[in-house]
Image (tube, helix red, strand yellow):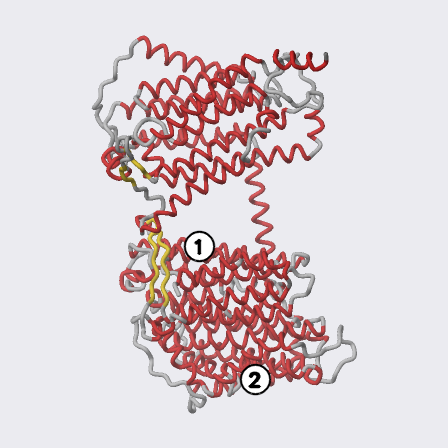
Amino acid sequence: MSLFLIVALPFLGALLPGIMNGAGRRVCAGVTFSVSLAAFVGLLSNLPGVLAGEVLVARLDWIPLLGLNASFMLDGLGFFFALLILGIGLLIIAYARHYLSRDDNMGEFFTYLLLFQGAMLGIVLSDNILLLLVFWELTSLSSFLLIGYWKHLPEGRQGARMALTVTATGGLAMIAGMLILGDIVGSYDLSVILQNRALIQASPLYTPALLLILLGCFTKSAQFPFHFWLPHAMAAPTPVSAYLHSATMVKAGIFLMARLWPVLSGTPEWVVIVTSVGLITMVLGAVISLFKHDLKALLAFSTVSQLGLITMLLGTGTAFGAMVAMFHILNHAAFKAALFMSAGIVDHATHTRDIRRLGGLRQLMPVTFVITTIGAFALAGVPLFNGFITKEKMLEEAAHTTLFSLPLLVPVLATIGALFSAAYSFRLIWHVFFGPVRTDYPAKPHDPNPGLWLPPALLAVIVVAIGVAPFLAEPLIKLVTASVLGGAVEMPEIKFKIWQGVSAALYMSVIALGGGIAMIALFKPALRLWDAAPRPEAKRIFDSIIAAAIAASRALINRLHNGAFTRYAAIMALTVVVLGYHAWTTGTMGPQTRAPQPANGVHIAGWLMLVAATCGLVFLHRNRLLSLILIGIVGLMVSVAFVFFSAPDLAMTQLTVEVVTIILLLLALNFLPNRTPIESSVLKRTRDGAIAIVAGLGATALSYYFLLRDPVATSISEFHIANSYKGGGGNNIVNVILVDFRGFDTYGEIIVLGIAALLIFALTETLLAGPVRARLLNRKPDQPRAGDMHPMMMVVMTRVIMPVVLLVGFYIFLRGHNEPGGGFIAGLVVSIAFVMQYMASGFSWASARMRYPYHGIIGAGVLVAGLTGIGAWFFDLPFLTSNYTYVRIPPFEKFELATASLFDLGVFLAVVGAVMLSLESFSRLARRAHVPDAEHAMDIDPSRDDDEEEAQA
């Protein structure tokens, strides 16, 4: 199966749970399970190639010049993580089907879960770091939805916000680090980056890139000092916690450190930072976990500790450490998912996760006891369970690692971490399942149906199988390790077996297990010491930092962003003037190479009209209607200037835009006072005037300077002129730029135009649904209105010229690729034709004859333009690449057919829809209660009056 399809399946399948939610819980879960199963089978179909040592690649070039390529690769490491994501994901889906109550929206839950699953697959299979960053942030967003799924719980909402804040902030740092990394190598493809170890480590930007990337990894994988968000994410439903802690979210940072291990590891910076952070996290998480009374909190901090262990192993920079880290990722995923699901079973059966209210469950829940015991023994590193193998290997690596020139530092801390890990694991078993049966359980404990215990039981079988026969995992781990090492170092010769021989690691392991048992025996006095000891509370520190940041932001915003446009304009203008003055005084001024052109009387008259209208607007702007007239004069003179400079496309666009906007603004002015009130003092107006004059003179001087000198660099217009016909098939360079060379910009602009129209519509809906509606309907005009609101002369004239205007618009559209015109201008011309009908006969009469909704016209335009761009992909071309050909249909002459015309059609539809939706919105506001909607095209119609008189007679 294609790697594209494997990644896309969860995203496409995310639509199904919501659709099938009404069909029942079983169908909803079944559909979700089927989607993940399909992706899982598709992944396994690529297993032969991975086992053969191949790196499978799927690539789609999007914007190659910017390094934006949708490319995926599947090697041993990617396969390993994708296997965990999909394999454990299937068990989580089956478990969640029975865990969620009937009050929970299962369709919503599984939609979020599949989105999260797809984002994780995107991370582990991406071959382009820019694409990886997109999926990286998607995991933060989708995990936010999963953690906050129980919206009625304040701790759920707070945990989701905390997780999003920490991981997204780290993600921003990582974006910068990845961009630096790509800049060092000259490529954003991981497959290229991983081949340039020497180049990266020799670069002076290696350290900044390393720090930024590690910041993103540490926040994602809950490493000290960012460990606090993960335990608060336990407010999520247990299936989410099991998935996050075992195979997905928190493993993303670990995965990225492993993926970049060949090019970033081995340096003193890497060893010191990664090993130190991993050790601190391992010990700190284990100590805190021991004294937690909430089952999920205990397991959450144990995850923090285990992630620290893996990080420490990767930080040593040795091939042995990397191999043990990969093995422990597999082991941890198995026993941690089983433990979280077991904790959910206990919570589900007893209605509490408080260990102090539990005990004696061994007799009441024997199946759950067996599964939990297997998982806890693996977590503690007890022999014959999978965790024992990797714990021994970890201690062996620690024994040979020196940090800060202290040979005993790493082994001592690693032993302490292992000791507390054993202690909290034994506490989980002893305090929950042993002891006398209690009579005050919140609910009667019992083992659940197989739907809840079977998924963790399958994982428990894997835990025991690897623990008893570790050689079963050896081929997979060596395959994964080979991908991690990437040829940077040689593969270590290791045999996975239970008995490792007498070594320092064995003694450290005995101390850890014995110390863990002793810690349980001394738990009560240790707990009293823990409770009495002063210690910082990470959540309180986080809340204080957030509160301080909010206070500082508000103080800054209140001073700068107070809603006064004059302040914004003044700050921006002053900044531009200061920077421009600095550039002017410190830069070099070349000699004048051009002579000013002579100006005749027409030029001067036009310039005087433009200046007069602009100055009049400054002094008379409080009269809104007069301001609108002056704005129209300015726009008209700009159109004339475009014609003078041989820019007919721009002139036509400016003129049509001017007509449409003046009409829409006249409608808007209908709801505003005639005059703008004076809100600023004379001093402020004087200040603003001075700033405006200085900025205007500066812009004038700069423009004059550049007009009299040749450009420093070659103008891009030369490229457009040379390639307009050859590359875009059109002689109208402006249109080819809009629909081909910069088609992506145009596509974004029509989307923005449509959004603006929809916002106007939404604002209108809000006004008409609120108390403002009554005021609008009952308002009285301040001046008498004409009795003939829809005069016959105007109606007849608009009917006569409408087909002519439509024909002109059609003509402008067809000629746009080779002559002045195009979809945008044609859309405005056609919009003017429709607007004229609304003006002549009124909104009610005209809208009743409109067959297609304006929202749909906007959507159709964006869709047509987008599909035209996507069509290029089927010919292995970048998005929005146009093509053209010439055809001859007798008896017509040969003519051109270009795909750009379809894109232009999308622009045309979007413009027409946006203009008409804006007009409709304003017109709805213009209705009044005492003015009935027009029933006829015109108010006075002699023929209609004669018919009525005859009918009455």
Confirm whether residue 208 shows in the render.
no
Rendered-image quadrant of the N terminus: bottom left
Is residue 316 shown left or right of residue 342? Answer: left
The residue at 49%/57% (across/down) is 12
Give above or below for 90 relative to 791.
Answer: below
Whichever of callouts 1 and 2 sits on the residue coming sooner in the sequence is 1
Q: Residue 815: horizontal and vertical position, in percent? A: 33, 29
Q: Quadrant of residue 530?
A: bottom right
**Residue position marked by numbered label 1 in the rendering:** 134
Q: Amino acid at mark 2?
A: Gly
Q: Amino acid at mark 1?
A: Val
The residue at 26%/39% (across/down) is 727
Q: Nearer the viewer, residue 351 or 688?
A: 351
Q: Residue 244: horizontal and vertical position, in percent? A: 54, 66
Give above or below for 271 relative to 166.
Answer: below
- Report the Cα–Cα distance between label 1 and label 2: 45 Å
Element at badge 2?
helix
Is residue 306 shown left or right of residue 443? Answer: left
Q: Quadrant of residue 470?
A: bottom left
The residue at 46%/38% (across/down) is 861
Confirm whether residue 778 shows in the render.
yes
Q: Quadrant of residue 362?
A: bottom right
**Residue position marked by numbered label 2 in the rendering:** 515
Is residue 304 shown left or right of residue 939? Answer: left
Element at badge 1?
helix
Q: Nearer the viewer, residue 41 or 366?
A: 41
Is residue 503 shown left or right of residue 517? Answer: left
